[in-house]
Image (spheres, grey):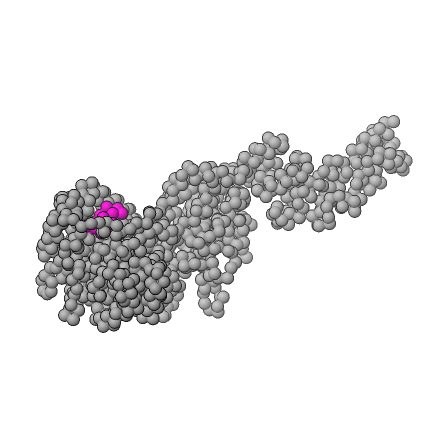
Amino acid sequence: MEWEVVIGLETHTQLQTNTKIFSGAPIKYGAEPNTQACEVSIALPGVLPVLNKQAVECAIKFGLAINAEIAPRSVFARKNYFYPDLPKGYQISQFELPVVGKGAVSIQVPAQGKKPAYEKVINITRAHLEEDAGKSVHGAVEGMSGIDLNRAGTPLLEIVTEPDMRSAAEAVAYAKQLHELVQWIGICDGNMQEGSFRCDVNVSVRHKGSGKLGTRREIKNLNSFKFMQQAIEYETRWQIETLEDGGSIHQATVLFNPDTGETRAMRSKEEANDYRYFPDPDLLPLMISAEDKARVQASMPELPEAMKARFEAEYGLSSYDTGALTSSRGLADYFVATVKAGAEAKQAANWVTGNVSAKLNAEDKSISSSAVAAEALAQLLKRITDGTISNNAAKEVFEAMWSGEGNADAIIEAKGLKQMSDSGAVETIIDEVLAANAAMVEEYKAGKEKAFNALVGQIMKASKGKANPAQVNDLLMKKLKA
Amino acid sequence: MINSSLKQLASMLQSKKISSVELTQSFLTRITQYNPSINAYIALDEAKTLAQAKAADARIAAGNATALTGIPLAQKDIFCAQGWQTTCGSKMLANFIAPYDAHVITQFDQAGAVNLGKTNMDEFAMGSSNETSYFGGVKNPWSFDHVPGGSSGGSAAAVAARLCAAATGTDTGGSIRQPASLCGLTGLKPSYGVVSRYGMIAFASSLDQAGPMAKSAEDCAMMMNVMAGFDERDSTSLQRDKEDYSRELNKPQTDQPLLGLKIGLPKEFFAEGLDASVAQVITAAIDVYKKLGAQIIDISLPNTGLSIPVYYVLAPAEASSNLSRYDGVRYGHRASEYSDLNDMYNKSRAEGFGAEVKRRILIGTYVLSAGYYDAYYLKAQQIRRLIAQDFIEAFKQCDVIMGPAAPSTAFKAGEKVDDPVAMYLQDIYTISTNLAGLPGMSLPAGFAQAKDGPALPVGLQIIGNYFDEARMLNVAHQYQQVTDWHQQMPDLKRA
């Protein structure tokens, strides 16, 4: 019987606000421990929370971006549990009434082996505002544990999906899409190393076709897409093997160990806390009016879907190209800048999604750290269009530009890659080659088509690649028929 | 001088008949003399206090004094005051020095008032007799065998014994009004949201409200002018225009200054459970109001009986969460020995909290637990709305509501400590106003002979509509123009 994996994600995104969600304390990452912690952050007796309006705006932006219901009234609740990095003994979160309700995110799942790429819609259950906890620091002082409350109170938007994903690839595609989206709308810096974007993944397996969900285990705090892929794959295998060996799955929280590539249960849910949620009496319900939404809407950037449609209409690009171009705000901006700098749109699209993206992927870089700026790329592409260099030569120039050897024109000049535009010079070379390869000419004339290509190759070689291949074809054909 | 009103003291200070340092010193002398037996103050710092008095004198000399500049006040130990030990009556915070000021403290500082010290209280404001304080009980200045009420028992005793000119209190279920009643003073719990809770150590956030405890309504009005006002650091603080709480008091006197005032008497406040001797005093007070021109109307607050059970679900629920921050990690009491993290939590909290606080944390934890939340917490919230609705209906018929503030006069220390429910019933007439968020006050209305001893003060409670504090203060003030109960002082040598 065939197994099916069922995956849902909970993602904690740190919101890009100036101050914490319930106090005026700054939230600079990497500061000296406890220097970003005011009296509210350390939960002194008598302090009270005041909601940061900027955090609310971020939540509204996200709701608008995924076409979700934005609650006109939502409620902050206390999630009660004891932990040293949780200074109040409760986390202020949202429970029954979250600020963002049902919405959806479209994802592009890339091709894998023979399986072609496809699109899928992942439904969002809810997104709610809450505060981050501090951090425990072990070993800073020999034999002691320390508490750093700099992070305590950092605003988070927790985004929860339906169990809609059916493979690690889908889960990673969703996580990547969400990662791009929250950066696109400017609510999160997306820095996974610093913990700005953290995913918890719920994994269960069942027999394909079964309508019932299996028992899930939650993989906590995955901070890279690579680990997410590995963790889900390992967890899925483990669950299937466990069930096939006659065992059963118990609900649990598990951690992924990148060194071993394995997941390991941290605590079982049976011994988990009863969080005793109740509405926080220190905070009024959060009211969001139609005017609030309209105001935030006005400040929203063009969203990927709208931009994709616009690119198709404006530039006549394919759905595939525009999908790739709008997969990140940076890539889209880069493409637009390239076109603006004078490149032809279709050509720019091919290069941005092709050579540029390949280079970025190979070096694991984001578009913002591309070694070739959009304007520089446009200059290169113009040299193809105006016939100065061939497409092949352009690839060589691009490599050199990427390595920092200068701008397109300088490299073309230095490497002598300029195409021959003088037909007389080309004709001379052709004549020389034909004279030197009389046998091949005979073969061609006897009906051996292949000999033609061999002759072109010889001519290109003799021109040191500078001849325009189309021109060579043209002239050679004329001469052979003469 | 120690029995002077705030207005008289302000006038003496500003006309330089007396300096703030002299006035402060005279209170400090009385504190030295009487506090060891009364135990009203748990933190004193003469140097700090006198420095403030000196600064006040300079301010008066510079001609920019406010009504309270140079006046020595006592602050309930629930307010964080920078550099002061701030314990909330608990061992948990016995070593806690507040590094910041509560809004109320800031307001008094800016007005130039002098802080005489921090007053004793029931631990985390949980109690009605001041007997749950880690720092020992407080004596009722009218009879040292008796309790002063609670939780603002230290403030009440300090005002009654004239160990300060006036004091602050907080009231979650009656903690200003019940001790005011038992000690013979005037105390006001404002409408919820009028005084900022920032820096006031939380017991039950949706019920807690700070207010003045003083000799007279006039004094309370002057205190309110400093304490009340919007504070952006408290999300439940109300953004209202600043008001002058004395404005109604200064109108020209007439024979019937309260002509047309409709006073509602809820039948539930005069039913079984009320001491006959207390009822007598209240009835006599109502008669005075009739003479002042008021009209008496019988009303009903049908859900009064539910207020105690509702309160003892909601207040502990909030408290159980509010008190979670006392975990021994960052400040406060930490057990000296423990085996691991959980052991540290367990021992620190077991050692740091007293029995009543533990009882309420347990109740609160229970009612919020999965499977019980709907039956207790949610149901209690629904009934809370019904109780508020009772008042809304009542105020369609009357302007103010009157009745006793407490069912009896002060009881003897130790009498109710083993019977929590009897203790909880002390707040039967006060709790419903907290649940509804309404203002309430208690003012001295006479004395009742205790079964086994001295005559002890009885408080008349006035409950007003939302934000009607100025009118309530005037209603109390007019009574105090024709009676002198509020000026009576206990004989501390005989108590």
Quadrant of residue B276 within the rendered picture: bottom left
Q: Is residue B475 magenta?
A: yes
Residue B214, above or below A442: below
Magenta residues span B464-476
- At a point 20% along the width and 66% down the height, the residue shown is B161
Residue B243, above or below A475: below
Q: Is residue B116 magenta?
A: no
Query: Residue at the right extreme?
Result: A435
Along the viewing direction, whichever of B172 and B214 lies nearer the viewer:
B214
Our reading of the magenta stretch's main secondary structure is helix
Along the viewing direction, whichever of B427 and A195 lies nearer the viewer:
B427
Q: Position of residue A17 (x, y in %)?
A: 48, 49
Quadrant of residue B382 within the rendered picture: top left
Q: Position of residue B381 (x, y in %)?
A: 27, 46
**In the displayed structure, does residue A372 sit left or right of residue B401?**
right
Q: Position of residue A289 (x, y in %)?
A: 40, 39
- At a point 53% along the width and 49% down the height, the residue shown is A189
- At a point 81% along the width and 30% down the height, the residue shown is A474
- At a point 23% along the width and 49% down the height, the residue shown is B248
Q: Quadrant of the N terminus of chain B?
A: bottom left
